[in-house]
Amino acid sequence: MMERYALAKEMYAKIGVDTDAAIETLKKIPVSLHCWQGDDVTGFDHDGPLTGGIQATGDYPGKARTPEELMQDMDKALSLMPGTKKLNLHASYAIFEEGEFADRDAIEPKHFAKWVAFAKERNMGIDFNPTFFSHDKVKDGLTLSSPDEETRRFWINHGKACIRISEYFAKETGIPCVMNIWIGDGYKDIPADRMGPRMRYKDSIEQILAEPHDKNLVKPCVESKVFGIGVESYTVGSAEFTLGFASSHEGCLPLMDNGHYHPTEVVSDKIPALLCYHPEIALHITRPVRWDSDHVVLFDDETREMAKEIVRNDALNRVHMALDYFDASINRVSAWTVGFRSWQKALLSALCTPNAKLKELQDTNQMTKLMMMQEELKLYPFGDVWAEYCRQCGVVADMSWFDEIVKYEEEVLSKR
């Protein structure tokens, strides 16, 4: 394998790419792994159904049912992934001691102490998401945009509590916490008032962000969505709303989920547009199939294009990257692993692209040569660079990692 890498390294060097440098760069780039793939977004603070316009489909055996099982499954997945990881939590994954419970407006850092211990033992930072769904205080499908002040106050207090918890995560791990605000508020059919809910939502976010916090430690984001199940006609937190809010509120980042747009839109094109105006942005990386279906991330064209835009614009330190999908129809640990490895492949592929040379061809209108070169690069021995990256990270590069999944399913998952 080392001989193959040496040949690949030489081949890439001829087009101005230092593969050793690419590998070293990628080793340091954190990617946030979402806890909710492991249990189909169920969490530990409620027994009700999944709501908010989202849905997990499938009933593959072996789902994690407890914090201990979820952490065990995540550990197995982490052992099969190269690179630097962060942990991404939803507020609904609070861990309570026996006989203890706090509603979402009253959760505290202590309810996430076990997650902090988990992350610190593995040298990971933690990102966080308030959970504005799957709760009996979601009234008529609305939370932060509700016309009912008692309902809205509950969810504002939840957001404030999450700000405090996010700062706790950052202080404990020594790594800034990206805290993402997303709500599923909207209407199934054509509303009579589109602006009113958005003004209430704006006021709610402003109240949440007014909670005292160190802006170097907590990085609040707002995430948009086109529609969800049951809110097909109108979504309060549209792309225009969230981008407008982030642009007009210092310290608030726009977060783009590449499943949260119309089917013909691509986030790869939006990344450089936002980087023109925002010092930092955030991504939730998924794979929409016809709609925001949150399929497992693959090493496909749009995934690669997103990574290219981050790398070619020298934005690896400006873009906060997190995975966000949940497939309950396949082995959940494998889903985690495939998605994470796919995004790592996309980033490494982008780092092994002669971006300066390609830009020069575009700027000098050598479009014929540009097309030729982009196509020829697709057959360069990227797989040998990937193998070397995995070797240096201590994980297998080929599909033999799946043997560990099969063994884990037989020994652990099948016995649940």
Image: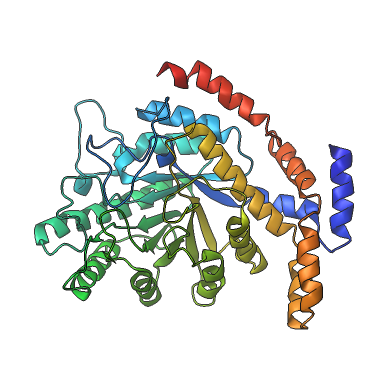
Measured from the top left, where is residue 174 in percent x and y? Answer: 48, 49
Measured from the top left, where is residue 135 in percent x and y? Answer: 21, 45
Quadrant position of residue 276: bottom right
Measured from the top left, where is residue 376 in percent x and y? Answer: 81, 61
Q: Name the one closer to the observer, 2 or 29.
A: 2
Q: Is residue 304 left or right of residue 384?
A: left
Instruction: Tell me the residue at 50%/52% (across/down).
Output: 287
Q: Does residue 74 appear anywhere in the picture?
A: no
Measured from the top left, where is residue 336 in percent x and y? Answer: 52, 39
Q: Does residue 393 appear anywhere in the picture?
A: yes
Quadrant position of residue 107: top left
Q: Quarter holding the N terminus? A: top right
Q: Is residue 50 left or right of residue 253?
A: left
From what the image shows, is residue 384 above or below residue 308?
A: above
Image label count: 0
From what the image shows, is residue 392 above or below residue 324?
A: above
Q: Quarter holding the C terminus? A: top left
Q: Name the one closer to the observer, 107 or 269.
A: 269
Instruction: Tell me the residue at 63%/44% (across/down).
Output: 83
Instruction: Tell me the residue at 57%/20% (across/down).
Output: 407
Q: Is residue 299 left or right of residue 155?
A: right
Q: Is residue 188 left or right of residue 217?
A: left
From what the image shows, is residue 399 above or below residue 125?
A: above
